[in-house]
């Protein structure tokens, strides 16, 4: 976006625009997402879903053989404030355990709703090889998991990433220890050095050979690398000649929704955010912890940490600026779902509802201590908590659409009481 802005200011010839416009791929996602989408609560703000795609077609085949589905390696939501004075980029770990809604597979079949890693949504929607379908299922999953309305979508593949870095003659990285990762095609010495080509791609993809081998460590490196790339682009891309190689690589490997598919709309978007200062461009990762804390048998995934994750998404939906340091501090001591004891009471009048909800909560790791019927039918779902258990109640209500929490001074134990009302529509 920065490069396109500079290109427009430089008065480049029309043939360049035509060339770059022809590079960009458009995906018609609007007709595939379906209804029941979140409202845009802050008109003027924009949420852009960015996917780093490691689909192994064509030149990307060298990065993994035997994969038969489209893959997503990186997932971010970029929120642009309505006044365009700040922006926040939220990384969603690819191992996030979320609910994936029913999606059109693109092969004549529809998937069943289920819980799995968030990046599976791209593979499900792209079963038929269509990026639009992959994007639509990913958008549905992110919207239902976060409550954010996604306005635009962009996907960039491996080759385009390398080309952009090479056009800048590399980016400096400073690994504290040597990195030898055959899976990422990377062999680096410790210390500061400039990487490009395969080494640059390997640096942002490496996972198992660095630190604790988690996706979270990789996200941190990706965020640092993108900040460095943006800073170098701002400093060095000052003429059309400098820009062309960068832009040619970027546009050849980018797929966007139809509204963004072109140099003009991308440059227009760039012009809206050109004055955002670097200290108000915030990179954060959605607060999370290892799912093993709630489900001891799961050693491979993470769950989003509530209520902090819910607070983050509600702030963005309301267009409130995120303080990255404060978010990190608030998430320092997670309250695991397993630590929250819940008694489920059926207030719907529908037989078996309490048992159904109890199973849904157990699947999220909550400790269900009993089920039963509420004294009377309830129109709205509510949570009653004993004195001093406000934080436990917030963890639970963050997973329930529209549920409110109230103190129950008569409660003598440490369990929350969930009254399932007629408005109950499942857990997030």
Image (tube, helix red, strand yellow):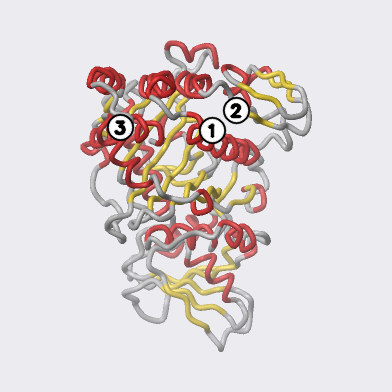
The Cα atoms of the two marked residues, 1 and 2, are separated by 8 Å
Give x and y (percent) for residue 396: 51, 65
The disc at residue 144 is none
State the residue lying farthest toward the bottom. Answer: 410
Q: Is residue 132 left or right of residue 243?
A: left
Q: Is residue 139 above or below residue 60?
A: below
Give x and y (percent) for residue 43: 27, 58
Secondary element under disc 3, as helix, strand or loop, is: helix
- Quadrant location of residue 420? bottom left
What residue would you read off at disc 3?
8
Q: Is residue 253 visible to the viewer in this orientation of the structure?
A: no
- Quadrant location of residue 134? top left
What residue would you read off at disc 2?
171
The reply to whether callout 1 and callout 2 are in contact (CB within 8 Å) is yes
The Cα atoms of the two marked residues, 3 and 2, are separated by 25 Å
Quadrant location, the C terminus: bottom left
Which residue is at a point 26% across and 26% down the rendered structure image?
108
Which residue is at a point 63% across and 53% down the rendered structure image?
294
324 and 293: which is toward the camera:
324
253 and 401: which is toward the camera:
253
- Disc 3 or disc 2, which is closer to the eye? 3
The reply to whether callout 3 and callout 2 are in contact (CB within 8 Å) is no
Q: Is residue 57 above or below residue 423?
A: above
What residue would you read off at disc 1?
232
Secondary element under disc 2, as helix, strand or loop, is: strand
């Amino acid at each position: 976006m920065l490069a396109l802005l500079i290109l427009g200011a430089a008065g480049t010839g029309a043939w360049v625009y035509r060339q770059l416009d022809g590079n960009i791929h458009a995906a018609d996602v609007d007709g595939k997402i379906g209804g029941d989408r979140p409202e845009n609560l802050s008109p003027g703000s924009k949420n852009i879903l960015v996917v780093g795609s490691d689909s192994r077609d064509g030149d990307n085949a060298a990065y993994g053989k035997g994969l038969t589905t489209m893959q997503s390696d990186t997932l971010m939501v970029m929120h642009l404030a309505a006044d365009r004075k700040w922006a926040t980029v939220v990384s969603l770990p690819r191992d996030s355990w979320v609910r994936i809604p029913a999606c059109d597979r693109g092969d004549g079949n529809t998937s069943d709703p289920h819980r799995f890693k968030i990046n599976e949504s791209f593979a499900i929607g792209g079963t038929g090889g269509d990026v639009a379908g992959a994007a639509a299922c990913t958008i549905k999953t992110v919207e239902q998991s976060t409550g954010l309305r996604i306005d635009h979508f962009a996907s960039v593949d491996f080759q385009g990433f390398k080309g952009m870095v090479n056009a800048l003659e590399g980016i400096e990285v400073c690994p504290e220890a040597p990195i030898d990762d055959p899976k990422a095609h990377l062999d680096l010495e410790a210390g500061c050095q400039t990487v490009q080509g395969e080494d640059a791609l390997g640096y942002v993809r490496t996972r198992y050979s660095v630190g604790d081998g988690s996706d979270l460590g990789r996200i941190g490196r990706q965020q640092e690398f993108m900040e460095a790339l943006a800073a170098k682009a701002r400093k060095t891309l000052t003429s059309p000649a400098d820009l062309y190689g960068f832009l040619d690589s970027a546009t050849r490997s980018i797929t966007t929704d139809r509204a963004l598919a072109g140099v003009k709309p991308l440059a227009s978007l760039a012009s809206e955010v050109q004055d955002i200062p670097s200290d108000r461009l915030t990179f954060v990762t959605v607060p999370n912890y290892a799912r093993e804390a709630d489900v001891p048998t799961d050693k491979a995934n993470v769950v989003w940490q509530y209520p902090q994750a819910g607070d983050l998404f509600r702030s963005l939906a309301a267009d409130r600026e995120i303080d990255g340091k404060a978010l990190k501090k608030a998430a320092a001591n997670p309250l695991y779902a397993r630590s929250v004891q819940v008694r489920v009471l059926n207030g719907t009048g529908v037989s078996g509802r309490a048992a159904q909800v109890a199973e849904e909560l157990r699947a999220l790791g909550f400790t269900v201590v009993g089920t039963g019927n509420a004294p009377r039918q309830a129109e709205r779902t509510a949570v009653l908590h004993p004195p001093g258990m406000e934080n436990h109640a917030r963890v639970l209500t963050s997973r329930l659409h529209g549920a409110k929490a109230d103190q129950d001074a008569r409660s003598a134990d440490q369990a929350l009481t969930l009254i399932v009302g007629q408005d109950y529509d499942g857990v997030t």
